[in-house]
Image (spheres, coloured by chain):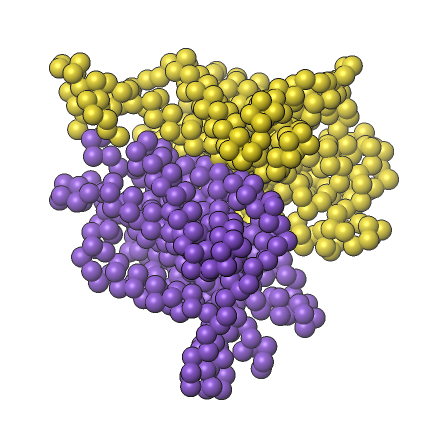
């Protein structure tokens, strides 16, 4: 990019403050663009702002909704960020979410009368495994045949959707459900308990998300493994020389992110939905990619970015009622956020310098 | 027999969105840019095309509006990767999500409404030939245009100097730049062309192929188009044949269902994605074969000054 009289110099390092500034700028620009866009479509700007960004936090019930939606977004994004830091591109989290939901659902569908204490923990394990198997296919094909994990995870998402429809119109359909493509309702033992005090209530899936966030934070800040993973992905040759392997980085990244997405899928069927159905997520698997980036691929940043995205999801529901704004609005906001973030993050990798102050700085070749 | 003729004939119209979008994506990828926003570009252009045809009754204007919408989104994508040097995968997803969101936003008030489809052209004399006539010579104008575009793009990429330059930039932009070519300008043009093609594909899908507006109109066809480029190993003719195959498979699954043949429709719907993975594995495992056709610099950004 070139501006008259200005030039870009690659940065060698960035400070956490710069990372934060880029994300904050992104959010401000996206909010402004969103309000402007809907104003042009005939809505009152204050109503828009109020509905999307204030009301989701204005009542205990709404905050509970925000927590319920933030949970899968953060969980998936934490997993994805591990891979993204190592340049392993799992963009099929939506498919892994679907597979995790399917495998976790098998147990309560087989034992719909169960009141076992073990049902929920077993579903958690099954959900994580389902996601891992689906992302593991991509890891296997990448490490054995060098097939791009970008294309494979994408294709597997569409295949997972068809697997879900196939099962819901066949063996997993509720026999007493008037042919609707959905399973039986899960027994209480197969649902996350509701936690929370007073007005704010959410389900216990947020505990898994918190554990994942803490785990990722420790992993990133303390563990040598994270460093090995990053080197393995960024510089395969150097990593090999130092004794780490690119294959390990690919397997680890894909399995962790697959497990996280599978858990998120399990959390949906064992949480707000309560059964397996054809509509499992409003694109959490894709939105989590944006959450991961907006959070600067940092566990703490992702935590806040996930809440912002969840606020807008809940705000979308409110705006639909308040101002008749179509339910696609949160998706538009996600797109805006990602576009602005990618634009703004140029300044994380380069600094913009006036050519006139550059007397003693050589232009990089 | 009549079912086979129906499938083979209808597959042409079914494959047009796949073929047009995949050929556009091919040109972008051949210049070294992986644009994953095809689904979003098709979705936005589908609604734009539909709105214009609903308002004016003109399919020419509708297809034109679709092309402008697709090109518009692709230019945002191009700005991110070429100007702001963003990661191509991330930028493609970003613009794709934006396009899908805008499509559902704008389409909300049109849900369930329809526009008149374009009449098919019966080529005189030729359409009277038994079997072949109804398959090949009773199609709408865009089908014929698509066939022409396949040939023109294949000829352009492999038999002209600008086509050669485009491919050089996709293989090694640094060398191309050193030789006096303009990788950034060429990539911008290729991405915009890809956007126009995706736009034409989307508008065709919503105003001619299925002229009734429904949310999620494109329903994954953009991803199939991305897949087709890999499936056709980056060769235009193979991509077009692949598009026809996927179109025929889609139509056959509908016909089989109506005949009560027990092939689950989901197996048919999943097959393009499954076939793409298999082809990708086969060509990727053999490094020579992928090197022959896949652009070496695909997905890598280039900037003239580091």
Of residues B48 and A73, the one drawn nearer to the viewer in this rendering: B48
What residue appears at the point 22 percent right and 22 percent down from the top-left corner? Answer: A6
Quarter of the rendering occupied by the N terminus of chain A? top left
Residue A169 position in % (x across, y down): 72, 55
| Colour that chain B carries in the picture | purple
Residue B58 position in % (x across, y down): 47, 60
Give the side of residue A120 with respect to residue A74, left or right: right
What residue appears at the point 17 percent right and 19 percent down from the top-left corner? Answer: A355
Q: Which chain is yellow?
A: A
Above or below, comparing residue B141 to residue A5 in the picture: below
What residue appears at the point 67 percent right and 52 percent down from the top-left corner? Answer: A165
Count of numbered marks: 0
Quarter of the rendering occupied by the C terminus of chain A? top left
Question: Which quarter of the picture shows residue A20?
Answer: top left
Residue A340 position in % (x across, y down): 42, 29
Above or below, comparing residue B301 to residue B117 in the picture: above
Question: Which quarter of the picture shows residue A191?
Answer: top right
State whether residue B282 appears in this view: no
Give the side of residue A345 with respect to residue B212, left or right: left
Above or below, comparing residue A346 to residue B283 in the picture: above
Give the side of residue B62 with respect to residue A104, left or right: left
Of residues B74 and A242, the one drawn nearer to the viewer in this rendering: B74
């Amino acid at each position: 990019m070139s501006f008259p009289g200005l030039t870009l110099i690659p940065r060698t390092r960035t400070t956490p403050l710069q990372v934060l500034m880029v994300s904050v700028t992104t959010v401000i620009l996206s909010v402004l663009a969103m309000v402007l866009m809907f104003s042009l479509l005939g809505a009152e700007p204050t109503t828009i702002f109020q509905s999307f960004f204030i009301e989701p936090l204005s009542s205990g019930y709404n905050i509970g909704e925000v927590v319920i939606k933030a949970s899968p977004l953060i969980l998936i994004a934490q997993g994805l960020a591990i891979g993204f830091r190592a340049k392993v591109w799992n963009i099929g989290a939506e498919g892994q979410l679907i597979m995790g939901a399917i495998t976790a659902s098998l147990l309560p569908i087989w034992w719909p009368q169960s009141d076992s204490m073990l049902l929920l923990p077993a579903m958690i394990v099954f959900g994580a495994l389902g996601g891992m198997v689906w992302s593991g296919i991509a890891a296997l094909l990448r490490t054995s045949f060098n097939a791009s994990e970008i294309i494979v995870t994408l294709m597997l998402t569409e295949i997972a959707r068809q697997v879900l429809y196939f099962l819901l119109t066949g063996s997993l359909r509720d026999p007493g459900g008037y042919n609707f493509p959905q399973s039986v309702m899960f027994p209480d033992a197969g649902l996350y308990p509701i936690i929370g005090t007073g007005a704010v209530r959410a389900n216990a899936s947020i505990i898994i998300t918190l554990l994942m966030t803490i785990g990722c934070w420790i992993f990133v800040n303390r563990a040598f493994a994270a460093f090995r993973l990053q080197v393995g992905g960024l510089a395969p040759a150097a990593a090999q020389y130092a004794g780490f392997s690119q294959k390990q980085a690919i397997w680890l990244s894909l399995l962790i992110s697959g497990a996280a997405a599978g858990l998120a899928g399990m959390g949906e069927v064992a949480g707000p939905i309560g059964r397996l159905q054809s509509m499992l997520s409003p694109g959490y698997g894709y939105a989590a990619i944006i959450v991961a980036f907006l959070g600067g691929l940092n566990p703490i940043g992702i935590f806040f970015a996930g809440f912002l995205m969840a606020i807008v999801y809940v705000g979308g529901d409110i705006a639909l009622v308040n101002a008749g704004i179509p339910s696609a609005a949160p998706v538009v906001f996600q797109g805006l956020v990602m576009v602005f973030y990618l634009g703004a993050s140029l300044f994380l990798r380069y600094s913009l310098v006036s050519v006139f102050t550059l007397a003693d700085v050589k232009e990089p070749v | 027999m009549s079912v086979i003729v129906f499938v083979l004939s209808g597959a042409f119209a079914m494959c047009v969105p796949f073929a047009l979008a995949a050929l556009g994506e091919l040109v972008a990828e051949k210049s070294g840019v992986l644009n994953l926003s095809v689904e979003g570009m098709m979705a936005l252009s589908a609604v734009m095309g539909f709105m214009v045809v609903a308002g004016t009754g003109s399919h020419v204007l509708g297809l034109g509006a679709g092309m402008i919408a697709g090109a518009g989104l692709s230019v945002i994508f191009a700005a991110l990767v070429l100007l702001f040097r963003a990661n191509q995968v991330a930028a493609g997803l970003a613009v794709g999500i934006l396009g899908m969101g805008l499509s559902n936003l704008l389409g909300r008030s049109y849900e369930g409404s329809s526009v008149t489809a374009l009449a098919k052209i019966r080529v005189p004399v030729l359409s009277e030939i038994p079997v072949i006539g109804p398959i090949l010579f009773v199609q709408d104008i865009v089908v014929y245009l698509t066939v022409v575009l396949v040939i023109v793009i294949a000829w352009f990429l492999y038999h002209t100097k600008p086509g050669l330059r485009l491919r050089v930039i996709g293989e090694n932009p640094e060398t191309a730049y050193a030789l006096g070519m303009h990788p950034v300008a060429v990539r911008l043009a290729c991405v915009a062309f890809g956007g126009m093609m995706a736009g034409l594909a989307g508008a065709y899908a919503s105003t001619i192929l299925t002229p009734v507006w429904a949310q999620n109109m494109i329903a994954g066809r953009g991803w199939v188009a991305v897949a087709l480029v890999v499936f056709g190993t980056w060769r235009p003719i193979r991509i077009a044949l692949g598009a026809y195959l996927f179109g025929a498979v889609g139509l056959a699954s509908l016909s089989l269902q109506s005949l009560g043949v027990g092939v689950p429709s989901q197996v048919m719907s999943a097959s393009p994605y499954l076939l793409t993975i298999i082809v990708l594995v086969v060509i990727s495992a053999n490094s020579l074969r992928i090197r022959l056709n896949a652009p070496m610099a695909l997905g890598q950004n280039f900037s003239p000054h580091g």
